Amino acid sequence: MKKEMKNSRKKAPKGSEKRGFSSFAMVMTAFAIVIVAILIINKMNAPEPSVMSQQAAGENSGGGSGSAPNFTLASVGGGSKSLEDYRGKVVMLNFWATWCGPCKQEIPDFIAMQEAYRDQGFEIVGVSLDDPTATAQVAQFVKQAGINYDIVYGNGQVAQAYGGVQSIPTTFLIDREGNVVTSKVGLQPKDAWESAIETLL
């Protein structure tokens, strides 16, 4: 009986603990590799951050930043428009979208400013950041709103060229030499824009 009990207490064969630890390590390593692979795939498939709506009104996205990047974009009125087409004029470049409440709120002021300063060499260019498939919707909105300035269909490239536009409305004021004088994020009071425009005109 004592012999049987002694035999039952025999240690596991040498190397079995080591083999058990190795198996566990292999399983954990494989698990870690799977987790890392999932994280990499998710990051690759994650959509790019969409343009957000207005930040705090009055927030500046920067002052003058040198020459305004040129672009050529399809126009709501047909054909295409390039920033070079406005060389020699004071240009207000406004990034907006039809789904953006603050963007729509400032449009009547823009219409009034375009009417008041056009003959002095002032032009507003609206860059729509709506979904690329919504061209008809944008064109209909422009007509219904009575917008009297040029609207072009924007894209990620032009938004990136202008510092990576993250929030709209974002508006740049460009002088007659094609230099960005100021830029602002969010809905701005009309008189603030008028003061800046009159200084450049």
Image (tube, helix red, strand yellow):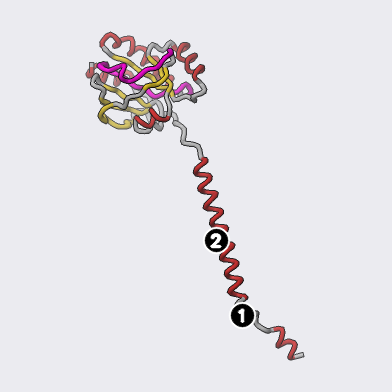
How far from the left and from the top, in percent, is residue 81?
37, 17
Q: Quadrant of residue 75?
A: top left
How far from the left and from the top, in percent, is residue 36?
52, 52
> Image point 57% across, 62% down: which residue?
28
Mark 2 closeness class: few <14, some 14–19, many ≥20 residues within 10 Å: few
In the rendered view, does 30 fall on the left or right side of 92?
A: right
Mark 1 closeness class: few <14, some 14–19, many ≥20 residues within 10 Å: few
Question: For the magenta stretch, what is the residue range?
Answer: 77-99
In the rendered view, does 79 fall on the left or right side of 88?
A: right
- Compare residues 168 and 101 and report the one nearer the observer: 168
Name the residue type under label 1.
Lys
- Alpha-carbon distance for marks 1 and 2? 24 Å
Label 1: element kind: loop
Q: In this view, does 158 lie above or below 11?
A: above
Mark closer to the chain start, 1 or 2 = 1
Residue 55 bears which disc, if any? none
**Quadrant (top left/top right/bottom left/bottom right) for the C terminus:** top left
> Image point 54% across, 56% down: which residue?
33
Residue topped by disc 2:
29
Label 2: element kind: helix
How far from the left and from the top, in percent, is residue 96?
42, 23
Name the residue type under label 2.
Thr
Please say whether residue 174 is one of the residues in the magenta stretch. no
How far from the left and from the top, in percent, is residue 184?
33, 27
Residue ranking furthest to the bottom: 2
Q: Is residue 124 above or below residue 182?
A: above
> Image point 33% across, 12% down: which residue?
114
Please say whether residue 78 is one of the residues in the magenta stretch. yes
Q: In which quarter of the image is residue 173?
A: top left
> Image point 45% across, 23% down: which residue?
97
Residue topped by disc 1:
14
